[in-house]
Image (cartoon, rainbow, N blue to C red):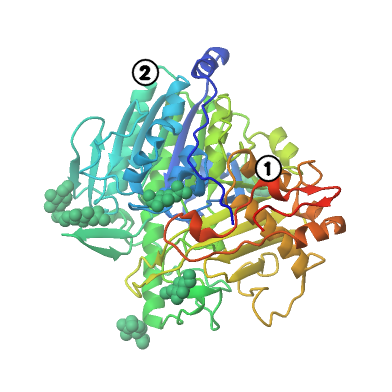
Amino acid sequence: MRLASIAAVFSSAIGVSAQQQVLGQQSNPPNIVFVLTDDQDVHLSSLEYMPLVRKHLIDKGTYYDKHYCTTAVCCPARVTLMTGKAAHNTNITDVNPPYGGYPKFVKQGFNSAYLPVWLQEAGYNVYYTGKLFNAHNVDNYNTPYPAGFTSHDFLLDPYTYNYMNSSFQRNKDPPQSHEGGYVTDVLAQKAYGLLDEAVDAKKPFFLMIAPSAPHADIQNNSGSLSFDAPVSAPRHANLFEDVKVPRTANFNPEMPSGANWIRSLERQNTTMVDWNDHFYRQRLRALQAVDEMVDTLFSRLESHDLLHNTYIIYSSDNGFHIGNHRMQPGKSTGCEEDINIPLIIRGPNVPINQTTQLVTSHTDIAATIFSLLDIPLREDFDGTPIPVTHKAIEAEENKRREHIQVEYWGFAGGEGIYDRRLHQNNTFKGIRIVAEGYNLYYQVWCTNEHELYDMSSDPGQMNNLLEDGGKVDSVFGYSLEKAVERLDALLMVQKSCRGKDCREPWRSLHPDGSVQSLRNAMAERYDKFYEGQVKVQWDYCHNGYVPEAEGPMFQDQGSAFSDEGFMWPDWV
Ligand SMILES: *[C@@H]1O[C@H](CO)[C@@H](O)[C@H](O)[C@H]1NC(C)=O
Ligand SMILES: *[C@@H]1O[C@H](CO)[C@@H](O)[C@H](O)[C@H]1NC(C)=O
Ligand SMILES: *[C@@H]1O[C@H](CO)[C@@H](O)[C@H](O)[C@H]1NC(C)=O
Ligand SMILES: *[C@@H]1O[C@H](CO)[C@@H](O)[C@H](O)[C@H]1NC(C)=O
Ligand SMILES: *[C@@H]1O[C@H](CO)[C@@H](O)[C@H](O)[C@H]1NC(C)=O
Ligand SMILES: *[C@@H]1O[C@H](CO)[C@@H](O)[C@H](O)[C@H]1NC(C)=O
């Protein structure tokens, strides 16, 4: 078996001088305000409890119903968002060293090659407040300082998830403790201050605001971490008293579901369910201060007369589950609750009060921001710009990539107070694909267990079609076997792709461009080709991205379809 070489390659950006002309070309370059919450779900209905986000963003902008993170945990998701690269290309796959966290981000060279730096090079002023990455803390905040900011005020570990005793670090100042202040209110004041600074500077700006809500509360008592429900501002403490986690089909089900460690979970007892309902209410309450902050931000943008020329983006780093498939509160799985997350965009020419089903991911965000600001795209982006105008959305409806790749390494742990085991072997790769006629999730675990869900008939992912004794033998009119052969080949490309191969994976399999979608790939003439593809297969489970563990890798020169038949990949 030959392994693809994985050396980190930072292809040189389009010349800086070309980028700097951008501002000259646009008579009135737009600004961007980006609000990024922490662990906010779509499927537990959190947005329904944020009337001001609805009023200013959903009702006045476009909601991306099929937006996904590709690695459902904070630091990897944030690095992907800010580099435009999948986690297997950043090798930031965890929240702490050795596989992730701020020190790993620096070590991988990204402190000089990520969004804030690129935006500054393009002539933008860049501001940030809130959580940047995990393991960015009161000791390492200045070794080095994160690059690329005109002004910043970061929330630092180990106080990031301490709702009533946060620690912020502004520009070159030492960290400052805000004991007794409610973290989102402290953050909101900082955000308004940065907005004022940005306005005073009279230059186009990018302002990112990253609250820690609604993440679980974590206290670090001299080295031992204790998790608790999120904390609300005192003024919101009594809201939603009767609200419970939505009792969807996969909520604490009678029969086990999923595979691997998830399948072996015991059903939660009533004590756990009750407490987890409390945890849920605390999340909703904690989000109220974010909702209020969004309202004030809009008033301020309006009073500065900036609304007509500012894009406002709202998203979360990853999703969240509570009780789904019997799991304790947490994320880091491939289930829809963890990967499908909010994305709302409002701004000049963005359709008002619209929802789109186009498939988008965090890998696309950096490219999207480049495109909104008219900055030439980088060749090494794994993602593509998300269309934001009516015309562009319509144009992409039948040709945009219809899937995203999901990847994860390491363990999963609950963030409530019950069952605090760390579940090992939570390493997997998946493909989430949705288009007219099909809606599927395919996942291969490092234990080589396989899952396939028909998300239209089974949105809760309760019926694994690939389980022994499965009762279904076809999906969207094709045999399961043939569909899985295609999905597996696509996953094989995506799991080690880089740049163009990630953006156009079907083209790596079919260089003549004849296949652009799963539907195209199902054609009978490709049956032999797909049958012959080497399958995704792990050698062993590992907590980080060690290619040796990950079995065969796709090499485009080896397994592309040609009309003469097909060529065997050279590792066979
Ligand atoms: C948004 O659109 C829906 C129909 O799609 C409509 O019922 C609703 O009133 C609209 N909301 C606003 C604020 O325009
Ligand atoms: C709050 O955090 C500071 C460090 O930023 C620490 O010195 C102080 O003891 C903490 N207060 C409480 C009540 O834990
Ligand atoms: C918790 O605090 C201890 C010092 O009391 C520190 O060594 C450790 O790194 C902290 N843990 C985290 C996850 O921040
Ligand atoms: C549920 O399990 C927890 C943890 O084992 C235990 O503390 C609690 O008493 C149990 N509750 C019931 C109703 O059995
Ligand atoms: C993890 O997976 C390996 C196979 O890579 C297996 O041998 C081991 O038993 C698994 N461990 C757990 C805790 O499931
Ligand atoms: C990713 O980082 C880990 C930890 O430093 C390292 O062991 C591994 O070889 C790296 N993987 C790649 C593909 O560079």
Q: How many marks?
A: 2
**Residue marked by disc 1:** 504
**Residue marked by disc 2:** 201
Q: Secondary structure at mark 2?
A: helix
Asked if 514 appears above or below 238 in the picture, the reply is above
Task: Where is residue 133? Give x, y as percent.
Answer: 36, 45
Asked if 427 appears above or below 383 in the picture, the reply is below
Q: Secondary structure at mark 1?
A: loop
Task: Where is residue 337? Give x, y as percent.
Answer: 53, 62
Q: Is residue 101 visible?
A: yes
Quadrant occupied by the C terminus: bottom right
Q: Is residue 66 visible?
A: no
Which numbered dot is residue 40? none
Task: Where is residue 442? Give x, y as percent.
Answer: 63, 63
Name the residue at 49% across, 57% down: 548
Residue 244, quarter of the rendered image: bottom left
Name the residue at 62% across, 34% down: 350
Residue 312 placement, left or right of 196:
right
Q: Earlier in the sequence, mark 1 or mark 2?
A: 2
Q: Mark 1 is on which residue type?
A: Glu
Q: Mark 2 is on which residue type?
A: Ala
